[in-house]
Amino acid sequence: MKQQDFEKKYQGAWLDLEKLLKEAPFKDNNIALPRLYHQVSHHLALAKTRRYTFSLVSKLNRLVTECHHHYYDGSSNYRFQFLRFLFVGFPAALHRNKTYVLASLGIFLLPAIIMWGLCFTNPDIIYSLMAAPQVAEFEAMYAPGQDKFGRERTSETDIAMFGFYIQHNIGIAFQVFAGGILACVGAVFFLVYNGLQLGAVAGHIVQVGYTQTFYSFVVGHGAFELTAIVYAGAAGLRLGMALIAPGSYRRLDALKWAAQDAILIVYGAIFMLLIAAFLEAFWSSSGSISPLVKYAVGAFFWIFVIGYSCSRGRGNSSHEY
């Protein structure tokens, strides 16, 4: 359908919704509102799919967003917007961008697996990526018989390490995400680099015989931390592809649309990194917890994160949060 015919056919519904939104006080119990909200959300999805003009898509997006704020902010069922983001907005954004999530996973995981194999079979390979003092430091961090694992300085408190992990992990995620604006090159670089680092450390530590201390340390918080890095990479790739292949939109307009989902994904990734930092500081590092317990809890975390990632959220997937 041509855009002119599309506008002529549905203009009445848009005007009706606009009129309702201007009513004062707002009547959130108006029976026409849910119907119009659903219709215009569908129109927005069609306009995006058919790549109608930016002005029309912007107009429909404004109507849907304004209706969402009026309707849900006034409803007792949707006052907890953070929970709505966690259980609706974030997983829905992941589902809409699953191609980028899978691409990010491959770019991160493949170098990690290759480097793990190389460092496991040849202990000297790691020195091509890290200096000898850094390798020795990693070995000391995972040596058996410690009260705290995974720490460079045993004098650090759990709270201090919690802050350190937040800064370190979010810094990595931001690099991966922001690098996407350079036509995906930066995102790909940081995903590959961090994958190589992870594989090198894992392969070397296992090769020297610290398998149990290393894997029992990473299995718990890794479910949130490693997945969050992949999500940040997906957000960066989403931005980069909007510049490389904007379709019928101008590059700036395509970047604006891509940023809406990318920001949602980054917010979710940051929240996951906060969880990971907490677990890493207070749970994973503890030498008093049995490795079997850590493996069991870690398995639960991985099942939960994978299940959550595969969910689609509720509601209209075309809705802009």
Image (cartoon, rainbow, N blue to C red):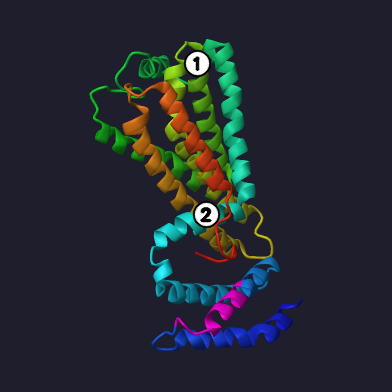
280, above or below 304, in the image: above
Instruction: Tell me the tag on residue 29.
Output: none
The residue wearing badge 2 is 262
The residue wearing badge 1 is 206
Image coords of residue 35 (percent x, y): 58, 79
Is 39 in the magenta? yes
Q: Report the front residue among 122 and 314.
A: 314
* Mark 1 neighbour class, 10 Å CA radius: few under 14, some 14 to 19, many 20 or more: some
Query: What is the count of numbered marks?
Result: 2
Task: From the viewer's perspective, tell me whether residue 157 is left or right of residue 261.
Answer: left
Give the residues in magenta. 28-41
Residue at the image point whose x is 59% and y is 39% from the top: 105
Task: From the viewer's perspective, tell me whether residue 198 is left or right of residue 102.
Answer: left
Does residue 263 appear anywhere in the picture? no
Q: Nearer the viewer, mark 2 or mark 1?
A: 1
Image coords of residue 257 (percent x, y): 56, 62
Amino acid at dot 2:
Ala
